Amino acid sequence: MLNAFRTGLLLLFVSYRLLAQSDSSYNSVPHQPVQLDAANPFPLFDDSFYKNQLFLLGESHGFQTPQAVDFTLLRHLNQRVGLRHYLAEVDASQARLLNQYLQTGDTTLLKRVFTRWVKQKAQWGNADFYRKIQRIRALNQTLPNRRQIRFVGIDRIQDNPLAADHLSSLLATVRLSNDDRAVVDTLLAQLRSSRPDSIVGATALPLLDRFKADSAAYQRLLKSTYTETRQLLTNIGWLRTIPSREATLFANFAQLLPGLNGEKLYGLWGFFHVLQEKPVNSGKPLACRIRESNLYLHDKIVSITFAYLDSFMMSPSSYLPIEARTPGQRFSPVSLFNNDGKMMHTEGIDVMRALTRPRSVTLFALDRPGSFARTTPLRIRYSSAMAQRIEFNPALPMTAYFQYVMLVRDSPMTEPLAN
């Protein structure tokens, strides 16, 4: 009996030691607070970081602090490596208006992009994102033309009426054949009347085929707008032929990349999109598709993700139980999705809390030599009530998915944008 007790005590001690080692491994990971107003907000980044070609920052939508970090990192990369292409979670038509706003300061263009997001109660249709774009314009006013930031939109078409306006403006003064004009008129009507995407895409495909079959003639006809028109028609056609959003993102990225002349790219995306390996029981994220491709930058990608403590997500009140809603408000602050919240618990997050301060952003460099994250998988325990889960492959280390983590503490929710 005594031997059994001693054996049990030893096993308990060994289990505790293993757990302590696992949980405390973040102690040895280089980490540093991010000072958003400092001359160099990110001193932890080393020379190898800046040698990358594609920098991806992954957030959970609805938290306010990542919007400020995003602008700071964009400005920092612009200053440090001359980065000027903001690879955005927007489509080509939205990017076009955002770039026109950056050039002109006409807020009606900016409001037009946000109108549909606000109507859909999308978390990214918020005032912090809106003001961030205004800050990018203000930054551009201080920069020479060669370093001014512009949006590159690679998303699946998000706003069909806006795509119709875009196509109409491109073809307004073009003398199309009667057959082509009939197709375009039908396509515009379908885009503006909420017809199913598959039907809209099917309408575009014959016209797109003619563009491909006689590209020289269409280039002479459309002149400088040929490439933009063909790319827009291609995206409309993909509403029918590419049902996967991630596949569309990658297809757009691959098509647009040669025209960016080897310049570096940066963007803030939803967490899933920046993962460089495929999660279990999931499709391949954008970053994974790029890494597995034969594109010249496939091995020059760095992914940074956010984690959250004591923070609040902006969530549509109508999606929440009555007791979780803020009375009379379209959106309510929700704390369920912190990394130590009721919906999930990330292993090691308690140690990360102990290493950081309230109301702070702390950068952890997971990819440094000797880091436990290079050999240890990411383990997240989910509540049974969590509908959407990302399960990480236990055979892969954390750094196979992302190389840096920014821990955000005490972030408010993003500020809702008025209708």
Image (tube, rainbow, N blue to C red):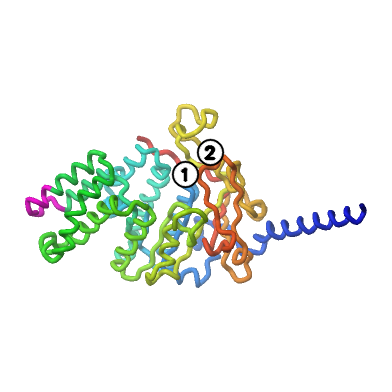
> Which residues are the magenta region?
171-182
Marks 2,1: beta carbons within 8 A: yes
Is residue 141 among the parts visible in the rendering?
A: no
Decide if residue 130 is in sight here: yes
Residue located at (41% from left, 45% from top):
124
Q: Tag on residue 334?
A: 2
Helix, strand or loop under label 1? loop
Numbered-mark total: 2
Disc 1 marks a residue whose amino acid type is: Gly
Looking at the picture, how far across and down is residue 41, in whole percent? 51, 60
**Can you give x and y, in whole percent of width and height, for residue 118 in the image?**
36, 39
Q: Residue at x 50, y 53 (%)?
A: 281
Q: Amino acid at mark 2?
A: Val
Q: CA distance from mark 2 to mark 1?
A: 9 Å
**Residue positioned most to the right:** 2
Which is nearer the N-term, disc 2 or disc 1?
1
Foreground pick, 8 / 223: 8
> Depth check: 25 or 66 in front?
25
Question: Percent x, y for residue 353?
Answer: 64, 51
Q: Nearer the viewer, residue 270 or 389?
A: 389
Q: Within 10 Å of the Cα at label 2, are there few (<14), some (14-19), or many (20+) other Cα atoms?
A: many
Which dot marks residue 366?
none
Magenta stretch contains residue 175: yes
Mark 1 neighbour class, 10 Å CA radius: few under 14, some 14 to 19, many 20 or more: many
Q: Picture quarter containing residue 32? A: bottom right
**Side (left or right) of 367 relative to 263:** right
| 245 inside magenta stretch | no
Tell me where residue 151 sits by quadrant: bottom left
Residue 30, percent from left and from top = 61, 64
| Circle 1 residue | 62
Q: Quadrant of the C terminus?
A: top left
